[in-house]
Image (cartoon, helix red, strand yellow):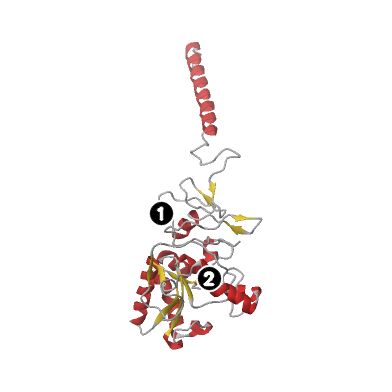
Amino acid sequence: MARYNKKSSGSLGAVALIVIAAMVLSSVIGVAMGNSETGKTPSGTPSGNVTPSGNTVDPSGNPSGGDQTDPDKEPGPRETALSRQDFTIDPATGMAKEIKVVDDNYMILVNRSHPLAQAYKPDDMVTVKYTVSGVGVKGETDQLRKVAAEAFEAMVEAAEEQGIFIKMRTGYRSYEYQRDRLYNPEVKNKGEIEANKSTAKPGQSEHQTGLALDIGGKSQNYALSYEFGETEEGKWVAAHCHEFGFIIRYVDGTKKEPGALTGYVFEPWHIRYIGVKAATEMFQQGGGKLTYEEYLGILD
């Protein structure tokens, strides 16, 4: 039969008090620090920042889309593109701020609601070797940004090895060229509603980025044609352009009616450089039918 020891009992009581105090203190510190062990944050405290596109990002700047992001994983091309452009739309105008600064963001989104400033002009453009003579303005529309020009020339040479011949009709277009030689004449001839189906307003044309171009094939004497997509050259471009960093940009429309997402009729001749990784990812996801808006998740 055990004996009752007052001294031992008193020591145990003191130890119990110390343990309880430590547990209370630990709980208070856990709440204050956001309980880092469980990953929970106190109520009312956001777990990440919000990008202009509405994607949640962790403190390192990686979009997470609501899922946990591996801190050791490099952000993909889509995540990088989303982090480098402000997609915020002004409710009063339905437009994002004009993009004024030219940088190395080759995945920049330009469309009817994300325009370029009138003065926007890249300073790294070069003349493309494979162009249709007598089209556009020499020293302007026969140029692209260096990275896009080199990619297109590599694509042309790869196609030629397979008996496919393509050339660029027009590449870079200034704000003024788009306004005076394309958009305004189209409005005058067809009216604004019809003109808007196939022709970008000045500042809303990808050509002004120096990363977009219109192409033609030898079988049609390198002309612009809705039938280009059905030619041997057009089919080759659709199947292989992503390997060189290009996408066919306006794929959700028909020959007569603009697509709901891009806002333009189908243009099998209009390709856009976004880089090999992004273009390949888009092709794998949609087989060439995915719009750039869908890929980025910017559907305003």
**Label disc, if present, on residue 10 of the rendered structure:** none
Quadrant for the C terminus, please. bottom right
65 above or below 267? above
| Residue 67, percent from left and from top | 52, 52
Determine the residue positioned at 51% across, 30% down: 29
Determine the residue positioned at 53% across, 46% down: 49
Q: Residues within 10 Å of mark 2 (few under 14, many from 20)?
A: many
| Residue 201, percent from left and from top | 58, 68
First of labels 1, 2 by sequence position: 1
Q: How many numbered marks does the figure carry?
A: 2
SS class, disc 1: loop
Q: In the rendered image, which quarter is residue 123 located in?
A: bottom left
Q: Amino acid at mark 2?
A: Gln
Determine the residue positioned at 47% across, 60% down: 78
**Label disc, if present, on residue 178 of the rendered structure:** 2
Which residue bears the numbered disc 1? 74
- Residue 251 seen in the current view: no
Could you tell me how far apart the alpha carbons at marks 1 and 2 are, in whole angstroms? 38 Å
- Residue 292 seen in the current view: yes
- Viewed as shown, does residue 261 lie left or right of 212? right
Q: Residues within 10 Å of mark 1 (few under 14, many from 20)?
A: few
SS class, disc 2: helix
| Residue 114, percent from left and from top | 56, 61
Front position in the image: 227 or 210: 210
Q: Amino acid at mark 1?
A: Glu
